[in-house]
Image (tube, rainbow, N blue to C red):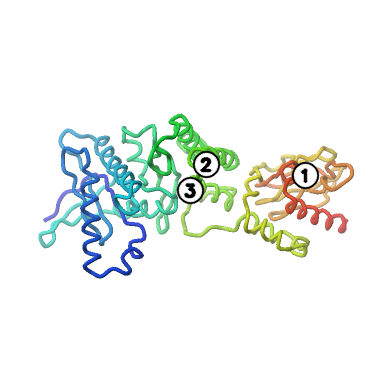
């Protein structure tokens, strides 16, 4: 017998490090452990609910709850119940009532069939909910939900936080992902200042929109501004909690590795492939022979191990033809070319050289007696740059030494 297709909200969860927890258990111990876990889940998601909501075991440590319209309910009511269940589970994790568990919530279509006396459910929605559950580990969250659930829910509007537009591994379309930040959830302290929390949520949502862009409103992704906002968000979160916000750190990591969003990003958002690119420090190791010859232990530690200094490099986009630095002007920083190329011109606008990705410019002015720019630099294409101010890099002896070595080599070539 086959049922009809219907729209539901799926809550899919999975215990973190289940294999490690049960590796040394005997079968009877695993059985008792899993039975207690599922019994606790059932009680937790039904706290304060007048009607019983079933949660079904799935693959041992996994579980699925299907939220359907009850009599008199609309879409908002169903989404609210699913989120409340996830919040109850997150609170239970915080107090140690259940092991750490990842939760994915997704609104989608399913169809049911009776096979061998049992109800079987089918639909791609289960795969999406599973991917959201898996992404919790990547973004450091206890649960994630898709845009439809986030949009239709009403109880937690003020605490809803955008995580980003994500295309998970093996997916061909993006998902707009959200979660909830509130006291006792996602490292937010129970006794924290509510005003700080709401300011964090507001700033975080603004930063994520700058990161993702908004095609419906004609807003294109702006990584330089998004990076500035995300760094502000991170500082606020650390001041509130003493910890970094992992989800914000992932976006900063993405900007670091892919500083200019191409057409693929505009269509698919973040492509989660399980790998990250080289840090700016690693890339600086490869930028020139003079740097490699100057390598020592201090260089290695600064460039590869303690890379907090990378945050001092401001991400900048310039259009083709824009003047970046002007000859005889006082220096305003040192530039690293991440993508594109620039032309260096003399005082008569004659071409001195063309610099491409991986090159540094602007350092010469800091190691000359005049302390002025010795060339005009113009974007030869749309270019992605990273700039560190003179005040900042002069506080970093190792970074300053690197740029000095590059300046010495250039003077030798001249």
- Label 3 belongs to which residue? 246
Query: Of label 2 and label 1, which has the lower sequence position?
Result: 2
- Label 1 belongs to which residue? 377
- Residue situated in front as seen by the camera: 387 or 349: 387
SS type, badge 2: helix
User: In the image, is residue 295 above or below residue 38?
Assistant: below
Quadrant in the rendering for residue 197: top left
Task: State the CA–CA distance, disc 1 to disc 3.
Answer: 37 Å
- Label 2 belongs to which residue? 238
SS type, badge 1: strand
Task: State the CA–CA distance, disc 2 to disc 3.
Answer: 11 Å
- Residue situated in front as seen by the camera: 54 or 22: 22
SS type, badge 3: helix
Looking at the picture, how far across and down is residue 394, in whole percent?
76, 45
Q: Residue at the spot x=76%, y=63% of the render?
A: 289
Looking at the picture, how far across and down is residue 156, in whole percent?
34, 34
Quadrant in the rendering for residue 192: top left
Looking at the picture, how far across and down is residue 155, in whole percent?
31, 33
Say which of marks 2 and 3 sits in front. 2
Task: Classify the position of the C terminus by image quarter.
Answer: bottom right
- Residue situated in front as seen by the camera: 283 or 317: 283
Count of marks, rendered view: 3
């Amino acid at each position: 017998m086959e049922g009809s297709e219907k729209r539901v909200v799926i809550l899919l969860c999975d215990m973190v490090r289940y294999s490690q927890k049960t590796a040394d258990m005997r079968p009877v111990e695993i059985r008792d452990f899993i039975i207690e876990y599922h019994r606790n889940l059932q009680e937790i998601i039904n706290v304060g609910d007048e009607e019983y909501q079933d949660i079904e075991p799935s693959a041992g440590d996994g579980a699925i709850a299907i939220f359907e319209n009850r009599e008199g309910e609309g879409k908002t009511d169903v989404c609210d119940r699913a989120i409340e269940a996830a919040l109850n589970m997150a609170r239970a994790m915080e107090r140690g009532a259940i092991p750490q568990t990842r939760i994915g919530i997704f609104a989608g279509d399913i169809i049911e069939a009776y096979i061998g006396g049992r109800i079987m459910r089918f639909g791609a929605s289960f795969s999406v909910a599973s991917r959201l559950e898996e992404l919790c580990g990547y973004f450091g969250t206890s649960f994630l939900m898709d845009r439809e659930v986030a949009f239709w829910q009403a109880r937690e509007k003020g605490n809803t936080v955008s995580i980003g537009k994500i295309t998970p591994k093996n997916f061909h379309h993006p998902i707009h992902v959200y979660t909830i930040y509130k006291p006792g959830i996602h490292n937010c302290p129970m006794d924290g200042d509510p005003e700080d929390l709401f300011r964090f949520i507001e700033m975080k949502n603004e930063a994520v929109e700058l990161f993702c862009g908004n095609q419906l409103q004609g807003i294109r992704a702006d990584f330089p501004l998004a990076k500035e906002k995300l760094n502000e968000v991170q500082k606020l979160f650390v001041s509130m909690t003493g910890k970094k916000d992992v989800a914000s750190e992932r976006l900063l990591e993405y900007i670091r590795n892919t500083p200019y969003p191409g057409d693929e990003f505009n269509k698919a958002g973040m492509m989660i492939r399980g790998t990250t690119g080289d840090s700016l420090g690693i890339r600086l190791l490869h930028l020139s022979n003079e740097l490699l010859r100057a390598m020592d232990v201090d260089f290695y530690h600064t460039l590869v191990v303690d890379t907090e200094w990378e945050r001092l490099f401001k991400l900048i986009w310039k259009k083709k033809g824009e003047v970046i630095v002007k000859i005889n002007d006082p220096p305003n920083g040192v530039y690293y070319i991440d993508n594109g190329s620039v032309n260096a011109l003399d005082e008569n606008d004659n071409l001195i050289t063309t610099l491409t990705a991986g090159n540094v410019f602007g350092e010469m002015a800091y190691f000359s007696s005049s302390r002025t720019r010795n060339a005009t630099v113009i974007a030869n294409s749309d270019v992605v740059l990273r700039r560190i101010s003179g005040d900042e890099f002069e506080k970093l002896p190792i970074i300053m030494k690197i740029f000095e070595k590059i300046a010495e080599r250039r003077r030798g070539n001249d």
